[in-house]
């Protein structure tokens, strides 16, 4: 029997003691305090909410992946599914792009999101990281942590733990009054995330637990991990609730968990009801009937469950992550995940199958099911202007000079976008091979303004032939990052160039470097003439006219790889590798009448852009 399973956490009256990390009082003590909410506790292997039995029927919904104007709609759809709780990660790098500069307004208004959930009848589980994985850039960690490319992460280290403390000190006080122990909707808070898949530094977990308690979080704390013995032992603390994450039939995973914690409640904090996609792979789906059948097995066993995901979303902008499994594998822009509620709000077959199962074990809302959100009519447009990126360098950024090796983007304080390197070749005559060590992730190479080749981190021995006549030539290297690794030991994944640039056996030095965050593209000088084929990455402009804003889906037939902005908002990346064909463009981003698209194509532009009324994820 673990310490946690014998004891419950006191409510608001015990904040001071709880702040020191203590586990206070018995379950009987908690239940005796009937005058005030006691929050979520555990007694005799089951959850109690304010002293009454409570089964958690939860779904994951990431507020940072859905436009805030659609939060209420998606939360309402979750409640219609029969869920009583919403679970969300909190992405630190979504709130803290620059160190110590926190933004909790607008799209980043976490408190508003949780209050809306409460209004539609949902409790909340919050997983504040700072590491969250989630197929999100750098697993939610802020890019500035990689200023030193070998910075220790997710372990006992003064620099890293100070960053954790700063983040938790910024986010957790905002949640204190939202806890169920104070009459609010938050019933539980996670410590770290799937730590057993990374390390076994229990001192680090203890540090995060103490920090969490010190900021007034007196709710139930938990750790979630995979179901192997090694993961469970490495990723849990004895006085915190242990939960498990898995896909498929729950029988085996729950049996493994029972060996580790025989008296804790059964709670699958991530039941993977779908999966995510990498560029160049097939689109992942799961069978709706089989998925619903496995949910029923969990409910029949008396377990609580969190559907991961309940609501699909989007990796808008530059926020898609990546994985390393022999090769570097960047994640697509869509995070639809084959969820019961799709990226664009559709109630799928999986929704209806799971809802039918939930209805056998809990009352369903009586309200009619929400209709599919309205969609724009299909149309096709062409481009009206273009301008090569390399002609805009001085307009987009000022240079930084390095007399020796080039440096990576995080060392310059840059979180997202592209980065450009330039040097002069004097006296080089004939042909030599150019090679880059430490590349993140694709490099387009130019000589005297003309593109001469491409390098890719998945081909570390790749080279580009550079031919010059002995006169001074300009060598440009434009690096296109496609997402920081979000899981596993490859987490230290700085972007740009972290090593050396070699021409033959000569190390190139004296670099002029420009950060290109591309966060303000207003006033680009588009021209109607067509750029030369070897001009390299080029911005293209197009317009679309709509009668009324609604959801739309943009496709780029014949285009190769690039980034899209709609009315100044960065929708995300497209790539002919697939599987994703369309980018989701939610209604709040459209204007009545004329809308402007800006497309940065890095290789081969197409001749048309499609606005479609249905998604195509491959």
Image (tube, rainbow, N blue to C red):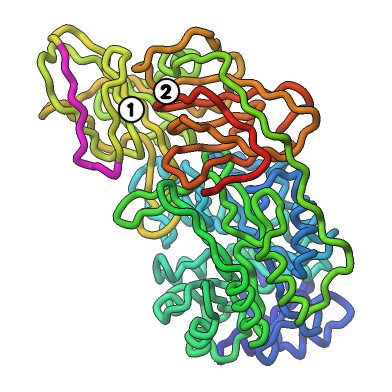
Q: Residue at x 79, y 28 (%)?
A: 547
Q: Is residue 242 above or below residue 187?
A: below
Camera-side residue of 90 and 332:
332
Name the residue carrying label 2. Answer: 537
Whether 195 is among the magenta residues is no
Q: From which residue to which does the magenta span run?
A: 457-468
Q: Secondary structure at mark 1?
A: strand
Camera-side residue of 288 and 490:
288
Q: Quadrant of residue 201?
A: bottom left
Name the residue carrying label 1. Answer: 444
Q: Residue at x 56, y 58 (%)?
A: 129
Q: Secondary structure at mark 2?
A: loop
Asked whether the residues under the numbered discs 1 and 2 touch, taking CB atoms below 8 Å apart as contact, a structural biologist would say yes
Q: Position of residue 385 (x, y in %)?
A: 55, 13
Whether 460 is among the magenta residues is yes
> Which circle marks residue 158 in the picture?
none
Which comes sooner in the sequence, label 1 or label 2?
Answer: 1
Q: Is residue 68 above or below residue 200?
A: above
Few, some or many C-alpha atoms within 10 Å of disc 2 (few <14, some 14-19, many ≥20)?
many
Q: Position of residue 297 (x, y in %)?
A: 62, 83
The answer to whether residue 473 is seen in the rendering is yes
Number of numbered callouts drawn: 2
Q: Is residue 33 above or below residue 478?
A: below
- Horizontally, residue 468 falls left or right of residue 2, namely left
Q: Quadrant of residue 184?
A: bottom right
Q: Quadrant of the N terminus?
A: bottom right
Q: Position of residue 239 (x, y in %)?
A: 57, 80
Q: Residue at x 54, y 75 (%)?
A: 244
Camera-side residue of 192 and 22:
192
Few, some or many C-alpha atoms within 10 Å of disc 1 (few <14, some 14-19, many ≥20)?
many
Q: Position of residue 65 (x, y in %)?
A: 63, 48
């Amino acid at each position: 029997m673990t310490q946690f399973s014998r004891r419950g956490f006191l409510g608001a009256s015990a904040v001071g003691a709880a702040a020191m990390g203590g586990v206070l009082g018995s379950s009987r003590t908690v239940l005796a305090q009937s005058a005030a909410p006691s929050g979520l506790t555990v007694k005799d292997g089951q959850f109690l909410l304010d002293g009454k039995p409570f089964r958690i029927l939860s779904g994951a919904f990431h507020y940072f992946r859905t436009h805030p104007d659609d939060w209420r709609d998606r939360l309402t759809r979750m409640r219609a599914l029969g869920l009583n709780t919403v679970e969300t990660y909190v992405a630190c790098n979504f709130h803290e792009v620059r160190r110590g500069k926190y933004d909790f307004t607008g799209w980043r208004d976490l408190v508003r999101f949780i209050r809306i959930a409460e209004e539609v009848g949902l409790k909340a589980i919050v997983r504040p990281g700072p590491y969250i994985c989630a197929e999100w850039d750098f697993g939610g960690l802020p890019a500035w942590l990689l200023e030193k490319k070998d910075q220790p992460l997710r372990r006992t280290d003064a620099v890293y733990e100070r960053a954790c403390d700063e983040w938790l000190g910024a986010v957790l006080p905002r949640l204190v009054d939202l806890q169920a122990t104070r009459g609010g909707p938050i019933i539980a808070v996670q410590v770290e995330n799937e730590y057993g898949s990374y390390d076994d530094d229990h001192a680090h977990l203890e540090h995060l637990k103490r920090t969490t308690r010190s900021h007034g979080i007196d709710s139930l704390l938990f750790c979630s991990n995979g179901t192997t013995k090694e993961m469970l032992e490495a990723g849990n603390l004895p006085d915190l609730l242990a939960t498990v994450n898995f896909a498929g039939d729950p029988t085996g995973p729950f049996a493994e968990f029972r060996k580790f914690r025989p008296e804790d409640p059964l709670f699958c904090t991530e039941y993977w009801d779908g999966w995510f996609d990498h560029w160049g792979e097939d689109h992942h789906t799961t069978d709706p009937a089989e998925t619903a059948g496995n949910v029923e097995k969990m409910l029949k066993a008396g377990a609580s469950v969190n559907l991961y995901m309940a609501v699909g979303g989007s990796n808008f902008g530059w926020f898609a992550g990546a994985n390393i499994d022999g090769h570097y594998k960047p994640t697509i822009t869509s995070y639809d995940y084959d969820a019961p509620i799709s990226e664009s709000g559709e109630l799928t077959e999986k929704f209806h199958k799971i809802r039918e199962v939930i209805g056998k074990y809990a009352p369903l809302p009586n309200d009619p099911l929400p209709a599919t959100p309205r969609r724009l009519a299909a149309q096709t447009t062409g481009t009206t202007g273009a301008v090569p990126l390399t002609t805009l360098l001085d307009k987009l950024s000022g240079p930084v000079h390095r007399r020796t090796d080039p440096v990576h983007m995080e060392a310059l304080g840059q979180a997202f976008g592209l980065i450009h390197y330039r040097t002069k070749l004097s006296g080089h005559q004939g042909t030599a091979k150019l090679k880059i060590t430490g590349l993140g992730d694709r490099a387009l190479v130019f000589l005297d303004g003309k593109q001469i080749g491409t390098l890719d981190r998945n081909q570390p021995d790749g080279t580009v032939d550079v031919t010059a006549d002995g006169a001074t030539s300009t060598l440009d290297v434009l690096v296109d990052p496609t997402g920081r690794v979000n899981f596993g030991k490859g987490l230290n994944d700085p972007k740009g160039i972290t090593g050396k640039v070699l021409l033959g056996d000569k190390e190139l030095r004296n670099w002029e470097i420009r950060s290109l965050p591309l966060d303000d593209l207003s006033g680009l000088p588009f021209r109607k003439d067509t750029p030369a084929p070897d001009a390299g990455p080029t911005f293209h402009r197009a317009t679309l006219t709509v009668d009324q804003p609604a959801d739309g889906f943009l496709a780029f037939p014949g285009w190769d790889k690039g980034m899209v902005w709609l009315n100044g908002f960065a929708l995300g990346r497209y790539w002919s590798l697939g599987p994703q064909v369309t980018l989701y463009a939610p209604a709040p981003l459209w204007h009545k009448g004329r809308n402007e698209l800006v497309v940065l194509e890095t290789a081969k532009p197409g001749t048309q852009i499609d606005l479609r009324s249905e998604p195509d994820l491959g």
